[in-house]
Image (spheres, rainbow, N blue to C red):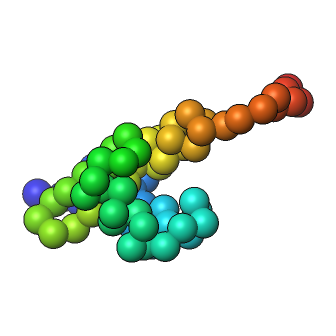
Amino acid sequence: MSNSAPQLNLLTPQDVATRLGISITTLATWRCTKRYPLAYLKVGRLVRYRIGDVEAFEIARLHGEVANDY
């Protein structure tokens, strides 16, 4: 079996916590209490987040008017 399958863009809890400006403990609390609908993958004891899910989470929490520079 070869390792030629494309690697998913997965983020660690540390990556996500840093990106959102929160602690890893807060992120873990959100997962356990289901406080926010931030999807995650769990394989064994490892937790990973898909970058698209994190981006969708951020977009869903935008408030105010956002200028479109396109």
Residue at 20% x, 57% y is 42
How many numbered circles does the render carry?
Answer: 0
State which quadrant residue 11 falls in: bottom left
On the picture, is 42 further left or further right than 30?
Answer: left
The correct choice, above or below, for 67 with respect to 5 in the image is above
In the drawing, does residue 23 fall left or right of residue 62?
left
Q: In the figure, 55 relative to 29: above or below?
A: above
Q: Which residue appears at 48% of the width and 47% of the height?
A: 54
| 53 and 32: which is toward the camera | 32
Where residue 19 appears, as percent x and y from the top left, is 58, 62
> Does residue 69 appear left or right of residue 62 in this picture?
right
Visible residue check, residue 6: no
Residue at image point 11% right, 57% down: 1
Q: Nearer the viewer, residue 51 or 17?
A: 17
* Residue for point 82% across, 29% down: 65
Residue 11 can be seen, yes or no = yes
Residue 60 located left or right of residue 41: right
Q: Quadrant of residue 44?
A: bottom left
Quarter of the rendering occupied by the C terminus: top right
Q: Position of residue 20 (x, y in %)?
A: 57, 60
In front: 51, or 67? 67
Q: At which x and y percent is residue 14? A: 45, 72
